[in-house]
Amino acid sequence: MTDAYTRFVRSAPGGLLAKQLGLPRPSRLLRRKDRPAPVLGPVVVLGDSAGADAIAHRLLEDGADVRRRPDELRSIGSVLLVLDEIATPADLGPVVLTLASAMRSLAPGARVVTISRPAGGGDASGAKDAALAAARGGVEGFLRSLAHEMRGGATANGILVADGVGLDAPGVVGALRFFLSARSAFVSGQFVTVSTSAGSATENPSLPLVGRTALVTGAARGIGAAIARTLAADGARLVLLDVPGAGTELSRLANELRAVPIQLDVTADGAGERLVSFLRERDLTLDVAVLNAGITRDKLLANMTADRWDPVLAVNITSQLTLTDALLEAGDVLGEHPRVVSLASTSGIAGNRGQTNYAASKAGVIAFVDALAARLAPLGGTANAVAPGFIETEMTAKIPPLTREIARRVNSLQQGGLPVDVAETIAFLASDEAGGIQGETLRVCGQNMVGK
């Protein structure tokens, strides 16, 4: 799904014209179907901490071509900057400047990942080391700026590992695998925090969700259908939910994926209880719940009415509250270590003109998963959200042409994402390895230049 402008500038005459005029020239992003290898190598690991040695050893065990010096390579596939032991801002320079000398050697579609500790926190008394906090905070500013400088479809992302959590924790390994792979093609300039050592290693990386049952709401089309197909490809058994009006598309997709369909309006009275009854009748236990159902009813607030405001809040956030309440209160329809992944939006982070209702609902989702994470933690479960930016869907195709074109270009990758980009990120957060990631909202926006 490539837009007309991108097709033109990727042609020889179009590329020459765009170069002469200084216009965006978006690179082709390699996704899993294009680059199934888990890591683009060679991988250079920078840093002299014990954690850097452990990460290098782990990558070697996974079969990666690992180097510790970039100057011996003409082409570099991936770079890891392991900064877990930096104590002052001056500690950044030796590692960062080693990468600086290697930037021109990065291959198209390269990956740069930082591994560091969060800037917050303190000792037992609550006191903070100012130099330590400044150094750790500096990593975040460096990484976000670096992501804007990447070229050729390359990305830069960071993993923040909470104090007391080892770099060998499942969440760290899982996040590293995700960021280094082609599955993260439209994720750049982002951080994910691994807050605990919970989770478990994936026994079969090619089928990380085998033996798991996943619910996807709003599954009949668009991003929901892409989520369903991606989870199925990762081995999950699926329960696909959508409104009765989407019954034909839902049945077709369920037949394609050998999934169990359920036609249900998530805003109807008793929707949660009806879902629980449906699962019990079929002896189904959910391991993953992807709360994707969502709608828009855009208008400036001056023209906003209840018939536009209320349905958006009801579908986008209230239904998530009622469904999760029903699943948790039932007690017998959730498996061990359940995963909940909700669909937020960059509109809920930065706001968007004409979307006060939509942004309110999606900001609510971000706060919701943070609260739900604490509720699921005693069960060994997690709750996280994915916030898409501009994704090429039927909905965004209805945006006025000029606005749509601007939305495509105002990110570091200079193009819209695809539904599969959102789906791949959800599949990662649904995996066993992501057990140490709690209450996070991971943006899938190509580093859209809005918000934080």
Image: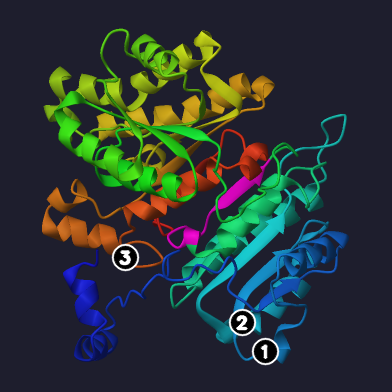
Task: Tell me the mark number nearer the camera, choosing from 2 and 3.
Answer: 2
Q: Specify whether residue 333 is in view.
A: yes
- 386 vs 89, left or right, is left
- 428 vs 364, left or right, is right
Residue 256 percent coordinates (x, y)? 29, 45
Q: Residue 221's quadrant in the figure?
A: top left
User: CB atoms at circles 2 and 1 under 8 Å apart?
Assistant: yes
Q: How crowded is mark 1: few (under 14 residues within 10 Å), some or many (20 or more)?
A: some
Residue 44 percent coordinates (x, y)? 70, 76
Q: Mark 2 points at which residue?
A: 76
Residue 247 percent coordinates (x, y)? 18, 30
Q: Name the residue under label 3.
A: 415
- Where disc 1 sits, the SS reads loop
The magenta stretch is: 183-194
Of the pair 246 and 21, the residue shown nearer to us: 246
Residue type (three-letter) at the residue carrying disc 3: Gln
User: Residue 306: within the magenta?
Assistant: no
